[in-house]
Image (spheres, rainbow, N blue to C red):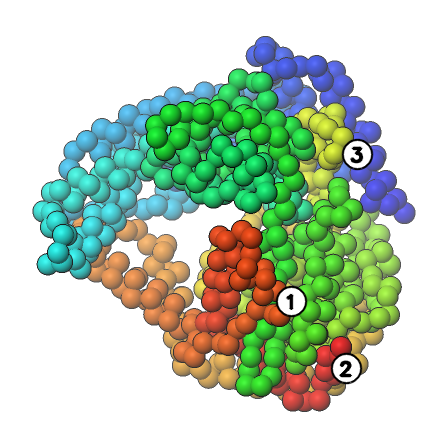
Amino acid sequence: MKSRKGLVLTALVLFGSLFIAFRSINGADSNEKIAQQQKLLNTVGALLEQQHYSPKKINDDFSKAIFKAYLDQLDGDKSIFTAADVNTLKKFESSIDDEIHGSPIQFQPAVSAIYEKRVAETMQMYKDILSKPFDFTTDESVQLDGDKLGYTNSDIERKDRWRKKIKYYTLERFVDLQEERDKNKGKEGFKVLPDDSLELSARTSVLKMMDRTFNRIKTTFTEDQRFNAFINVITNTMDPHTDYYPPIEKRAFDERMSNQFYGIGAQLQQDDNGIKIASVVTGGPAWKSGAIVAGDIIIKVAQGANEPVDVSGYATDDAVKLIRGDKGTEVRITFKKQDGTTKTVALIREKIEQDEGLARSAIIMEGNDKIGYISLPDFYANFEDKNGFRCSEDVATEVKKLKAENVKGIVIDLRNNGGGSLMEVVKMVGLFIKDGPVVQVKERDGRVDQQTWRDNDASVLYDGPLTVMVNEFSASASEIFAAAIQDYKRGIVIGSSSTYGKGTVQRPIPFGRPIDFYSSRTEYGAVSLTFQKFYRVNGGSTQLKGVVPDIVMPDTYEYLKIREKDNPNSLPWDAIPQTAYKPWDGTVANQINEIVKNEQARILSDANLNLLQDNLKWLSANGERPINLQINQFKQMQAQVTKTVNQNNTLLKLKTELNVQAMEADKEKFYNNPDKNKGIRYQEWLKLLKQDLQIDAGIKIIQALANNQYATAKK
C-alpha cells in the first residue's frame, strides 16, 4: 500500500510541474496574471478529480453549485448584487466546469467587475442614508438572513434593503445610548442629551463602522483575494475541509498549528485612530529596538526595501499578516508617535513562541481532594522544528506535574478544540491506555489501515480517573481522542449532544517553488486535500454524527447550525468493521454505567438546566425571525432577549465558585511572569474556571469514579 508520504510526493510530481512554465512571472502584466490564474485553476481542478478521497464530478451540476456559492461568498445577505446582475452572470452558470478544465476564465473576472462597481455604489448609498435622521416610530422590520431573501429587482429596492439594515444598526446604538442616559441621569458631570443628539451620535457611530468595513474591503479584498476566494469555493464544494491556502494564509495556518511565528514581538489592538501597539514583548525585536512603545500607531508596513503598504483601513488581522513573515527577514514599519511625529523602524523578524496557545493546567480543590484540570485548545505540532511544540509532549508534562500534586483524577477539556495533528492525538491517547489501535484510516480505494495509527507502548503515564469535556466545536482530532477514551472505557465523556462531526483527514499539497529553506511553504500556496476518512476502533465514523458523550449537558451553542451535518457539501456517514482492541481494565463496565446513569439523572432533574434548555430553544427560534424596527417593539424584544441571555449566563455559572489554584510548578508563570500582561491573562484564565458549570460536572464524575475504587493516580 502506498504510504501517505508517497501520496504527497506523487501529487507534487503530478501537479507541481504544471507551474514550471510561469515561475518567472512577477504579476506586472495582466495577461500573464490571467495565465497564472488559469494554470492555478486547472491544477486545482486536476488535483481534486485525481486525488480527492471522494471526488464529485466536475460537470454542469458542480458548475451551478460553484455559481451560487461564489455569489453567496461575496454577498451573503444579498445586498450587493441585484437580480439583474445575477441574470447577466447566468450565462456562466453551466460553464465554470469548462473553465476548470481549461477554457478561458470568464466567470470570476465578470463577477469581480460587477462586485467592484456595486461596492462603490454601496459606499455612496450608505453615506446618503446616514446623512438623514431615522424615524423609529414607523412599523417595519428587517430580515438579515440572506437565505430567506431574494436579490433586489431595482435600485430603489436595493437602497431600501440597505436603509433597513443600517436603520437596525443605528437603532441598536440609539437604544444603548438612551439606556446609558437613563442610568447616569443625575450623576455629577454627566451631560444629559436629547434624543435627536443621541440619534445623530448613533448614526455617526454607524458611519464609522461602515466606513471601516468598506475601506477594508477596498483595501484588502483585492482582485487577487477575490480570485483566491473563488478557488476556495471550488475546493469547499468538493467537501468543507478541502481548502486552498495562498502563501500568506498557508503561513498563518502553519503558525496556528505550531504556536510559533516570526515577527516583531508586539501585541496589537485597533481603535478609531487605527492599529496601535498595545504592548511589546520583553526580549523581542520591538523591545530590543528601543524605538517602539505602547500607543504607537502603525501607518505603513514594508517588506525590506520594497514599497511600503499603507495600512489605513486594515483590520488588525490584515496588518499582522504583513508584519509577520519568514525567519530572518526584514520588516520596516512606519509609526505615528504620540507626539505627532512619524518614525520608520527596521526590524529583523525573530521566532516568537505563543505559549498561551499551549496545553495548560490547574488544580481544583474539592474539600481535601485535588482534581487536575488540563485545557488543550488544539492538537498542535511543529513539524519544521524538532524542538518545537507538540501537544502530546506538553500534555505529558502537565500530567506529570499533576501527579506530583497527588491529584485524585484529571479532567481534560477539549471544548472548542478544532483538531490538528493525527499523529499527536495518537500519541496523546497512548498516555492513558495500554498499547492498541487508536483510530482506523480508510483510503480512497477502500483499503483500511488498522496498524499505522496505534499506540505501541504498553506503558501508561496516567491510570487514574479521567473525564473528557467536549462541545459542538470539538472536531477531528478531538473527536478521535474522545472516541478512543469512550471505546476503551478509559474514562467518561461529557458535553453537548454531539461533537462537530468531522471524520476526514487532510494533507497539504504545495504548489510551486519553495519560498525559503526553513519551511514547507511555496510560492503559490497549497491545497489542504481530503484524501482519507478515519473511523473509531469500534468501526463507527464520527463523520456527520460526531461523538455522542456518555453524559449530555445543555450547551450555549446546541441549537446553532454549525456542525458538519449542517453543511450540504459534507461527505456521507458510513462504518467499517471493528478492529481488535482490549478495553481498559482499570474498572468494571457496570461501575462506569452506574456513574453515567446517576449523573445524567441529576442533570435531567435539574430545574435550572431544564430552564436553560428552554431558553436556548427560544433564542434559536427568535434569531430566525425578522427584526422589528419600531422602537417600542424593538425595545420590548431586546429586553426579552437580554433578560433571557442574562438568565442563561447566570444558569451557566456555579452559585458557589470552584477553588481553582495554579500548580506549585506554575506559580512563577502565573504570578511572576516577565511579561506582566501575560501573567495577568493567566490569572484571568484561572478566574474563568471558577464559575464553569461543566467543569464542576466533570469533577463530580472524577469523584464518583474514585469512590468506586477506580485505579488512582500514581507518582
Q: Nearer the viewer, residue 312 or 553?
A: 312
Q: Position of residue 13 (x, y in %)?
A: 82, 29
Could you classify mark 3 by the number of other residues whose Cα lies within 10 Å: few (under 14), some (14-19), or many (20 or more)?
some
Query: Above or below — where is 95 with respect to 404?
Result: above
Q: Nearer the viewer, residue 578 or 455?
A: 455
**Amino acid type, residue under disc 2 in the picture:** Gly
**Amino acid type, residue under disc 3 in the picture:** Ala
The residue drawn where x is 71% and y is 27% is 515
Of the numbered discs 3 and 2, the one sitting upstream in the chain is 3
Mark 1 residue element: helix
Mark 2 residue element: loop
Residue 101, image quadrant = top right
Q: Could you say which disc has been placed on residue 665 in the image?
A: 1
Q: Are marks 2 and 1 in contact (CB under 8 Å)?
A: no
Q: Could you say which disc has been placed on residue 586 in the image?
A: 2
Query: Above or below — where is 474 with respect to 488?
Result: above
Of the numbered discs 3 and 1, the one sitting upstream in the chain is 3
**Amino acid type, residue under disc 1 in the picture:** Ala
The residue drawn where x is 59% and y is 73% is 363
**Residue at the right extreme, as displayed:** 1
The residue drawn where x is 70% and y is 14% is 24
Q: Position of residue 543 (x, y in %)?
A: 66, 57
Q: Position of residue 476 (x, y in %)?
A: 66, 56
Q: Could you say which disc has been placed on residue 583 in the image?
A: none
The residue drawn where x is 58% and y is 24% is 303
Question: 374 left or right of 659?
Answer: right
Q: Nearer the viewer, mark 3 or mark 2?
A: 2
Could you classify mark 2 by the number of other residues whose Cα lies within 10 Å: few (under 14), some (14-19), or many (20 or more)?
some
Residue named by callout 3:
11
Please state the total of marks drawn on the protein image. 3
Residue 256 visible in the displayed image: yes
